[in-house]
Image (cartoon, rainbow, N blue to C red):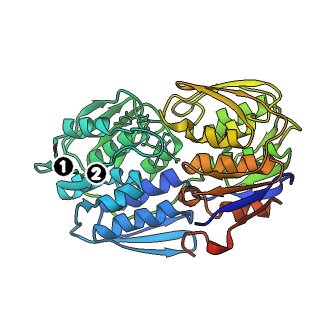
Amino acid sequence: MPTITVEGGRVLSGTLGVRGAKNAVLKEMVAALLAPGRHRLTNVPRILDVDLMADVLRHTGCVVEFGDHELWTEVPDQVDPVTPIELVRKMRASIVALGPLLSRCGEARIALPGGDDLGARPIEWHLDGLEAMGAEFDLVHGELVGRVDGRMRGAEVELPFPSVGATENLLFAGVLAEGRTTVVNAAREPEIEDLIDLLNSMGANITGGGTSLVTIEGVERLHPVEHDVIPDRLEAGTYAVAAAITGGEVTITDCRPAHLRMELRKLEDSGCQVERGEDWFRIEGPPRPAPVDFATLPYPGFHTDMHPQMVAFLSVASGVSVITENLYDARFRYVGELARMGADISVEGPHAVIRGVDQLQGCPVLAPDIRAGAALVIAGLRAEGVTEVGEIHHIDRGYEDFAGRLASLGASIERSVADSTPPGRP
Ligand code: EPU
C-alpha cells in the first residue's frame, strides 16, 4: 500500500498556486448531464474524485476526455440514468446525479449511499425536496429508483439545514422544471455560487446565489458550457496550516482569501501573521501557536473540512483549545492517530479539548478520511522524527500531488516508491 513519509523539522517557505475546488468541479461535471453536447471545464484538479466522477458520467453514456487541468464531456442525446453501487461506494457525491438525471430522463436509478468515513450522512432532505417537485422514490434492493411524470414541477422547498448536496440537487431539478422553484435556507457555499454561475451560463435562470434564498425560474432547455472552476479554499487553507505549523512563511496564490475569512481569522488569533490580496495571501506561522476555540458551521462559519488540520496545529499550542464539531458525528476518528503521535486530546460528544504539547513524535499512522489524512501529514511536519501515513488514497481523493507540493515548499516528504505516481490525469 502506498504511504506518505514525512520527516519533521523543516520550515516551509515559498509560493504555491491553488487548484480548482473539488467540491465545485464534481457537481459541475454532473451539471453537464442537463444538456446534450460538448462541455468544457478548466482549472480541473488532478484528484481521484474527479476520475471517479468521470466514471459516473461514462456509465451514463458520456464520453469524458482529460487535458492539462481541463476536461471535456460529450453528453449524448439519450442518457442512461443509472449509477451503480461500485461507483457510489467509492464516492458518495455521486448522489448529486439524482437531480440532473430526473430532470433530463424523468428517471434516476442510483445505489443508495450508506454512511461513510464521516458518519451516517442521510439524504432525506434531497428526497423530500425532489418529492415536493413531483418525483417519487422507491428503494428496490438497495437501489434508489426515482421517477417523475413529465417535467419536474417548481415548488417552494424549505431545507431544515443549509445542506450543500440537497441545495445542489434542487438546483439541478429546478433549472429544467415547469415554473418557479424557491429554496429557502439554501446553502451559501462559494462552490454553490460557482455552480449557479455555470448553470446560468448554460441558459438557466437562477437568482440569489450566495444567499439563503435561491430562486430558479425553470427553462425549456439548456446548452453546453465552458467554465473555469473556482479555486479550492480547502486546499488553500490546508497549505496555510501546513506552513503555519512549521513556523514558516508561504504565499498562496490563485485563491480567494475572502472565502477563508473565518479560518484565516482563527489562524491570526493563534498568532499567525496574514497579509491578504484579492487572489493571494501570505501567512507566517508563530514559533508556537496560541490556543484558540472554534465551532464548525455552514459557510461562512468555520468549515468542517478545515477542522482536523486546525486541530493538528493546535495540538502543539501553548495552552488548551476547545472545539465543537457541528456537522459530522464521526469526524473525530483521527484523534486516536494524533494521540499516537503524542497529542493530548479528549473528545466528549461533539466537543474536543486539545491540551497543547511541546512536541509531537513521528510514528506510523493511518488516514481515516481526506481532511484527517492531510492533518496527519501536517502533524508530521512538526513532529520529531519520521511519520508514515498509510491509507493515502483518502488524501488522493481531494489533494493533487499532496506530497510533491509540500516538498516544493521545502518539506522533507515523499510518497512511497512502491506507488510513486499520484493518481490524476496528465
Ligand atoms: N444531512 C442530513 N440529511 C440530508 C442531507 C444532509 O442530515 O438529507 C446532514 C449531513 O449528514 C451533515 C450535514 O447535514 O451532517 C451537512 O451535509 P451537507 O449535505 O451540507 O454535505 P454534503 O453535500 O454531503 C459537502 C461536501 C463535504 C462537506 C460538506 C459540508 C462535497 C462532495 N462534499 O457534503 O466535503 O464537508 O458539504 O460543507 O461537496 C470533503 O471535501 O472532504 C467533504 C466531506
Q: Position of residue 268 (x, y in %)?
A: 78, 32
* Residue positioned 22% across, 39% down in the render: 154
In the displayed structure, 280 sits above or below 81; it is above
Mark 1 vs mark 2, CA separation in Å: 8 Å
Residue 166 visible in rendering: yes
Residue pointed to by mark 2: 98
In the displayed structure, 80 sits above or below 94; it is below
In the displayed structure, 192 sits above or below 420; it is above
* Residue positioned 83% across, 28% down in the render: 318
Residue 34 visible in rendering: no
- Kindly identify which numbered label has been placed on residue 146: 1
* Residue positioned 22% across, 50% down in the render: 142
Q: Position of residue 400 (x, y in %)?
A: 61, 62
Q: Give the amino acid type for the residue marked by disc 2 in the picture.
A: Leu
Q: Give the amino acid type for the residue marked by disc 1 in the picture.
A: Gly
Front residue of this view, candidates 281 and 351: 351
Evaluate if marks 1 and 2 touch, with contact meaning CB atoms under 8 Å apart.
yes
Q: Position of residue 327 (x, y in %)?
A: 49, 32
